[in-house]
Structures are given as C-alpha cells and as structure tokens.
Image (cartoon, coloured by chain):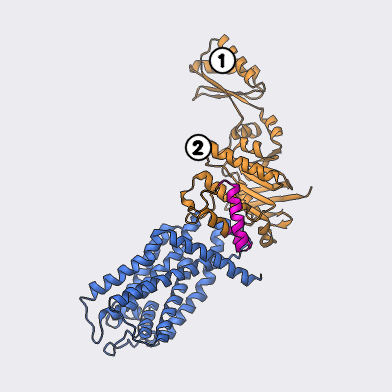
Chain colours: A orange, B blue
Amino acid sequence: MPDAIVAEGLVKKYGDVAALDGMDLTVPEGTVFGLLGPNGAGKTTAVRILTTLLKPDAGHAAVAGFDVVRDADRLRAHIGASGQYAAVDDHLTGAENLEMVGRLYHLGVKRSRRRARELLDHFDLTEAADRPVRGYSGGMRRRLDLAGALVANPPVLFLDEPTTGLDPRARIGLWDVISGLVAEGTTVLLTTQYLEEADRLADRIAVVEHGRVIALGTADELKDQVGGDRIQLSVTNAANLETAARTLAPLAAGDVQIDAAALQVTIPVTGGATSLTEALGRLAAERITVRDAGLRRPTLDDVFLSLTGHEADDKIEETVR
Amino acid sequence: MNTLQLAVADGVTIARRNALKIRRAPDLLGGVIMLPIVFVLLFTYVFGSMISLPGMSYGEYLLPGIFVMTIVQSAQITGYTLTQDLQKGIFDRFRTLPMSPSAVLTGQTISDVIMNLTSVVTMALVGLLVGWRIHSSPFEAALGFLMLLLFAYAFSWVTATVALALRTPEVFNNVATIMSLPLIFLSNAFVDSARLPGPLKPIAEWNPVSTLVQAARELFGNTSPAIPVSSAWPLQHAVPVSLLWSVLLLVIFVPLATRLYKRAVSQ
C-alpha cells in the first residue's frame, strides 16, 4: 500500500522555540493516523506544514505524492483541511459557504451548487442550509467546516482537533461522520488531545511532545504501555492516604499516584470492575473510609505519565499558574 | 483555465462573498447608504445655511468634497474587513484551496469598489434632491464618477496595506481614523485651501484629496469664475494629476499589500 503522507525530519522554529523538532510520520493510504499531544506539542504546526500553510525550516514532506513545498500548488487540489477554528463565514449561509469553496476548487457553478446540497444533506444541515452561519451551534459549524474540507472529495483529509470545544453529544456525532468517511477510503490525519478520540478513530497513533514523536503504535499497543483502566479513589482522612496507597499497591499494574491535596490515590489496573471491588474490600479491611471511588479510562495525562514520567506539559503549567 | 483566468474567476468568487456579507451585515450597510445620506444632508443644511460663496451655492461647492470624503472613509472597510478575516480561520481555508492567492485581495477590493459605487450613487441622488446640479456634459460627468471610483479602488489597496501591517481590527480602526481625518480636512473639500494659514496651505494644496476634489468640481461643473483656482500645480491640472495619483497608489500598494498578505497568513 503506498503512503499518502510521508514526513521526514520536519523542523519549524519560532525564534528559539522549536515547534517541530525533527518530526517523522508515515501514513499508509486509506488509514487514519492520530497525532496525540497536549497544546503546544507541535500538532497544529505539523498539520499547517502538511497542508501547505507553512514552510518547514528543515526536513521534507510529501502528501498524495506531491512535495508540500515544491508542488504546493498542485497538492492543494488533493487535500481537504478542517481546523480547530471553524473556517466558515458567519454572514454567509451554510449553502453559500460550501458553494464558495466549490467554486474555489474550480468545480464550476452548477457542480458547486449540487455538491453543496449533497454535503449539507450528508451532514444533517439541510434545514439550516439557507440560514446565515452566525446562528449555527458549535457542532453545526464544525460539521459545516468539515463539509467544506470534503467539497472536492479529496483523497487525503487533515482534521486539526475536530472536536475540541464540542459538547459530548456533538463530539460523538462528529466521530460517526469521520468514521463514515474513513469507511469510504479517505486517508485521514487527525490531531487530538483526547486519547479516547484517537482510540475511537485512529488506526495508528503518534504521541507528540516538544515537536517530536515520542511513541508510535496502535491504540491497543499504547494502552498496553499505559496500563488500561485506572481506579481513582479519595479518602476522608489525610492520615489514611499513605496506608491506602500501600494497601492497594499489590493490585496496581503500574505506578501508584498520590495526590495529597485531593486526598486521592490513582492506580492503573487490568481487572476493571473486579479490581475495583477488590480494592474497596481491602480498604474496608483496613478500616479506611473512602469518600468516593471509581474506575476511569486512561487520559492523555496517563499516557504522558507512563511514557515520560511527567504529565502533559501544558497541564503542569496550568497547575502552577 | 490559465493562471490569469483563474485569478479573475477566483477574484469574482471572493468579491461575490464580500458583496453577500455587506448585504447581510447591517453595520456595513449603514456605512454604505445611511452615513453618506447623513453627510450630504448635514453638511448641506448646517454649513450650507451659514456659508455663502460668490457666484455659486455652498451646497454645490460642497458636494464633490463630500463624495471624496465618503469614498476615503468607505475604502477603510477594505482594511477593516481584512483584519476581521485575519482573526478567523477563513484565510487558512482559502490557502488550502487550489485558488489563486491574489484573489483574496482583488476580490475584496473589487467588492468594496462596488460598495463605493452604491455610496456615490446614493449621495448623487440625495444631492440632486437638495439642489446639487451637474453643469457639465454627460461625458465629463461620467468621467468624474469613474475618476472617483478609480481613486476609491486605489485607496482600498492603501487601507489593505495598513490593515495587513497592523492585523488587529481595533488598532487598524484607530490608525485609520487618525490618518484619514487630516487627509480629509487638510484639503479644499470644505474650505478654499488658498486661504489656509502658513504651512497648512501648501500641505492642503498638495494633498491628493484636494486634487481629487478639484477634479470632481471641474468635471461636474461645480465651479465659479468668482472663485479662482489655486495656483498650485496639482490643482491647476487636477484631472490628469488625480488619475496619476490613483495609478501611483495602485503601483505602490498592490504589490505591497500582496506581499504583506502572504506574510500575514504564513505564520
């Protein structure tokens, strides 16, 4: 299978800061590739280079067989991009927005109009088609923006944090739409801060930090490294925190985390609900009162913690601030 | 399609988008139609009732000045719209499309000149209602309107350049207002520049706005032998110098705006 996206040693610097510091990527045709990382990891910079919006300072990349710098003009006819900030025009209606994009792809007036209606139908926007976009909800705008990226049926699609800022229902709706596209054979590169999203959509995931790929694999491979679900529980008495952590250590599939401020203990487990029952039983035997307890899926922070020994960077800054 | 055809087709698509935006945005529409009407009525009745000129009414003397004032101000919409679009993701979308890169600016300036045409027609009609008359041949009058629109188009590129250098709508608005007020009022638009004191006189006489106002007065026949034209060279040859100004602005600011646009969107 030929590769739809190949990037080697991409570097992009802003002053002294390297947004990209030697990033390599390979995405086979017809697959979905997830770039997973916190804000400022370089995900958006990578997408901007691959979609010809930025020139790399070093390294090279090709998309659909076209060099992103040398053949930028020809490449643009073969890609679609949908960004973090929905690139739609507020004063235009949904239909007018898509028609404009069709014309700028040089589909001609009639085909642009027909394609706009098709996409509005497909994205469940028919009713809102002739209303100005400024009245759309966040989810509707994202769907329209995504539709804009699909006007010319591009074989390669770039989605930069497609669901950031959406409510859970709109997010799941958008996931279904993206899954549908993939089923039709489109190659997709998507960036996300959510492990769950990468897990749900991507065939392969690259974890990005400081402009480089620090881990690469399928969602399952990454989760094996990260260690499955977490038990997260808090105790009522600070004096019990250490004892609780010690009591639970034998159940842990990885490092036990203690958050003294929140009186919270987090342990990675492999047994799911069974592990949770077991944990509560052991604590009861030690007469430790638990305020609340639950099982949760691993997050981006857990991935970073197990890969690098620290949480995702922007998270740390937020805590400090 | 070859490159030039593509550029034209894409420019038309963008111009169409902006025209739709103007129709939908009440603030822009107000600036295009309501404000010019208010200008004509206010200046004609407030100043017109106080000031009398030898050989002609002040209202007739004034209207070409109001035309020019309005197009100088309306041309700022080009810059303002660009700064607003820069804040959103729409230019990113454009730049991932296989469209002509120059189309964003040509489309924007073309739609703005159409808007300016609307303003000028509105002002001319209201002017006719309140007593303004064209005393020249239809050919000269048509040339007068064309000259105004050409200048408006050229000045749009100036505001586009300023906007792309400054990039934020608020900063642009402040700078544009500070720049345009002296341009408009240090001129012969409302007063006889020959009677201005000291250093203000040569500044006003060489101000391109004065040249354009004088040219418009000549082409619409709003002059009086009792009001002598200043002896300053640009005012003595107002029509050709006005055209020259427009061409000069285009030659300088089209490439400059284009370069700044590329810089602004590739970060």
Q: Is residue A110 rendered magenta in the image?
A: yes
The amino acid beneath tag 1 is Thr
Res. B91 image quadrant: bottom right
Find residue B176 and report its image quarter: bottom left
> Dot 1, crowdedness within 10 Å: few (<14), some or many (≥20)?
some
A232 is higher (above) or lower (below) than A52: above
Chain identifier of the residue bearing label 1 in the image = A
- Main secondary-structure element of the magenta-colored stretch: helix
Q: Is residue A13 visible?
A: no
Q: Residue furthest right?
A: A1
Residues behind callouts 2 and 1 on a single chain: yes
Is A254 displayed left or right of B50 in the figure?
A: right
Q: Secondary structure at mark 1?
A: helix
The furthest residue to the left: B50
Q: Residue at x 63, y 60 (%)?
A: A111
Q: What's the magenta region?
A: A100-124
- Is A3 left or right of B178, judged from the image as shown? right
Judge from the rendering whether residue B24 lies leftward or rightward of residue B227; answer left or right. right
Element type where label 2 sits in the image: helix
Q: Which residue is mark 2?
A: A318
